[in-house]
Amino acid sequence: MMKKIITGLAIAAASLMVSIGTPSFNSLIGETAVIAEAAGKVLSMEDAAKKLVKTAYKAHDQKKKLTTSVTIKCPSKKAADNYMDKLSKAIVKEELGEFSDVEDIAAMSEVRNLTSNKDGSYTRGDTYKNGKLTVKVTYDGKDKEWRKYNERIIYEKQNMGELRELTKGMSEIDKAWRIAVWLMVDHKTKYYGDPSKFATSDKDIAKNRAQGNCSSLNMMYTLYATRMGIKAGGVSSNNHEITCVKIDGKKYYTDLQGVASDHEGWVYSQTLDYNDENVDASRVVKFVPDPTGRWLKVPKGDAEAMESGFITAYDWEVSEGEACWLTEKQAKIRLPEEGFGKPSKWKYWWYK
């Protein structure tokens, strides 16, 4: 009888060890304690995602190679791919929050956390057993390429957060213009002719050091504009490229290279007084009193009405469009005069 009891206890102990961990001897209390292993604990999708994201950022911050495991419920081996997809989506939601709807950032979050890479910078191993799927991931916080993934997510979230706050409640045309001002004025982005000196990453923008030629400036703009729901692209002619957006079926044009200098002109214009006899009131550039960063050349009466708050905007279609979006009609007249070439020679491209 005693032998049966001992055998039963041994089987039970072995079963306990398999299910929750490996025993270790605790010298303080003189007995063997069972320590639960994190990898064996079944987590919800949300908690598993939280653990993976936390480890990834820890590896980045500490510049170390860190390995972690998560175990989630999975009904069968056939369902493993489906549950990995669910885990990927949970990771995106955990890491990006309100920005999880931005497709390219979301895709990067999935890749950075769960895709195996041949160079070993981040690897994954999956094990299925008895209704459980265990995912083991290694993040190499010292690897330059992996760190780039991590930093892109960090700075894209930062930049998108700024833009969403700045453009809250704006119309599409106002939002499109505010993005141009955000890039070229708020973040001091510069034109630079030497391709070897271009700096066009999300981190470069956030750190106020972005610079590039006409094409690369436009690519930075269109990337963020499309993320904000604006249809944007470029128009090239005579070895130059300018920015084009399409809103409510209408095209609008601007040259990003001129935005910063024109902004300086607008700042100066705020010191001018219509009543000063030395000032040509009809040519004073006045700021439209909304947060778009827009400035238009408008007649004296309308400018005064805007300043007093009697009107709050000026019709895009009838303004001269100075230092701001040109309508298609305006562009076809002004751009050829500035050497951009005939409209029949213009080549368009759209980000997506």
Image (cartoon, grey):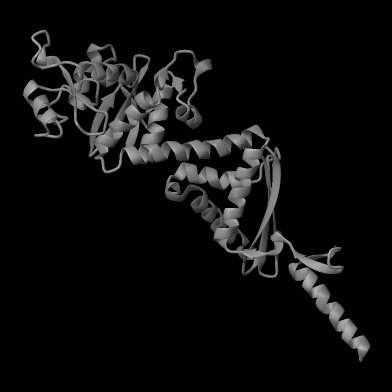
* Residue 84 at x, y percent in the picture: 59, 57
Q: Quadrant of residue 87?
A: bottom right
Q: How many marks?
A: 0
Which of the two residues, 330 or 273, is positioned nearer the viewer here? 273
Q: Residue at position x 62%, y 66% from top?
A: 74
Q: Is residue 143 visible?
A: yes
Establish if 159 lies above or below 106.
Answer: above
Lateral position of residue 199 relative to residue 70, left or right? left
Q: In the current view of this chain or complex, which residue is farthest to the left? A: 301
Which of the two residues, 318 or 61, is positioned nearer the viewer here? 61
Establish if 32 lies above or below 38.
Answer: below
* Residue 246 at x, y percent in the picture: 27, 34
Q: Residue at position x 11%, y 30% from top?
A: 308
* Residue 175 at x, y percent in the picture: 29, 36
Q: Is residue 352 visible?
A: no
Q: Quadrant of residue 4?
A: bottom right
Lateral position of residue 176 relative to residue 315, left or right? right
Q: Where, quadrant-wise, is the C terminus in this rendering?
A: top left
Q: Quadrant of residue 167?
A: top left
Which of the two residues, 301 or 316, is positioned nearer the viewer here? 301
Lateral position of residue 239 relative to residue 301, left or right? right
Q: Residue at position x 26%, y 32% from top?
A: 292
Q: In the current view of this chain or complex, which residue is farthest to the top? A: 278
